[in-house]
Image (cartoon, rainbow, N blue to C red):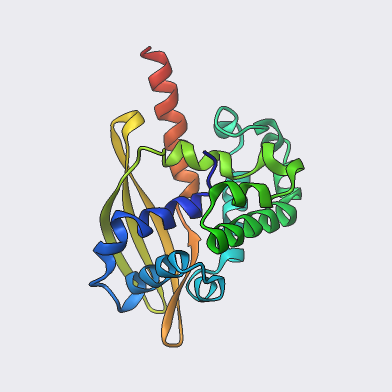
Amino acid sequence: MKKLLLLVLLLALVGGGYYYFQSQKNGPKGALVLAAAAVQSHDMAAFEKYVDVSSVTGHLVDDVAQQGSTLTSLLPGGSLVMGGALRMLKPALAKAAHQEVQRYVETGSLEAAAAAAPKRLVNISLTGLASRVVSPESEFKGIKYTREEGDNAFVGLEVTQPRYDTTMVVEVKMRRLGDHWQMTQITNSGELLRGVARLEKKRLLNQ
């Protein structure tokens, strides 16, 4: 099942992690609780208050484009990354990702979200990468760390990766906007993808 990395993160919050965060109403973690609640209530306006979707997806496209040959085995159409075409397609890819997120929040259906993206972008969509980092069998374990630096904060969300018998930490960047915080970036997406590529190579060699 195809998912955006952002959606996987939020699905983790909506699931087991949502109740963990219920006691963390204030600060950056509280914003993640409210973003998850907006997904549950299909309230896109509230969701975008706590998640800058355009910023997150834009940074994600940039991060993926910088990975080069590392991602060839993970990303359908990986050769496009090698040639720099992915960066040229950034506006279209970011727009498609935003449409997928909006459709998912409004309907709660991953199938509807996937259908919202232009068909011509599916093979180089970011959705295919998500299931390699966080598989359908993955579980949310909890908060690994929280670090505040002025009006910015970094929250590490630990998830299991049963395929490789390990765990991974997805780090999200938050910024303070007046009386609330907003998620703006997944800061270690490149590191996560490189890690998965190494683990997959090791798994194949050990077969």
Is 7 left or right of 166, judged from the image as shown? right
Instruction: Determine the image quadrant of residue 100.
Output: bottom right
Residue that sits furthest to the bottom in the current view: 178
Residue 136, placed above or below residue 93? above
Residue 30 location in percent, x, y?
34, 73
Residue 176, placed above or below residue 178? above
Residue 153 location in percent, x, y?
38, 70
Residue drawn where x is 41% and y is 65% of the image: 36
Residue 152 location in percent, x, y?
42, 73
Residue that sits furthest to the top in the current view: 207
Is 25 left or right of 95, judged from the image as shown? left
Is 139 left or right of 126, judged from the image as shown? left
Total residue callouts: 0
Residue drawn where x is 43% and y is 26% of the image: 200
State the residue in front, 198 or 24: 24
Residue 39 location in percent, x, y?
47, 64
State the residue in front, 153 or 25: 25
Residue 32, placed above or below residue 8? below
Instruction: Determine the image quadrant of residue 157.
Output: bottom left
State the residue in front, 193 or 12: 12
Residue 42, placed above or below residue 150? above
Residue drawn where x is 28% and y is 66% of the image: 21
Q: Which image quarter holds the C terminus?
A: top left
Is 186 left or right of 121, judged from the image as shown? left
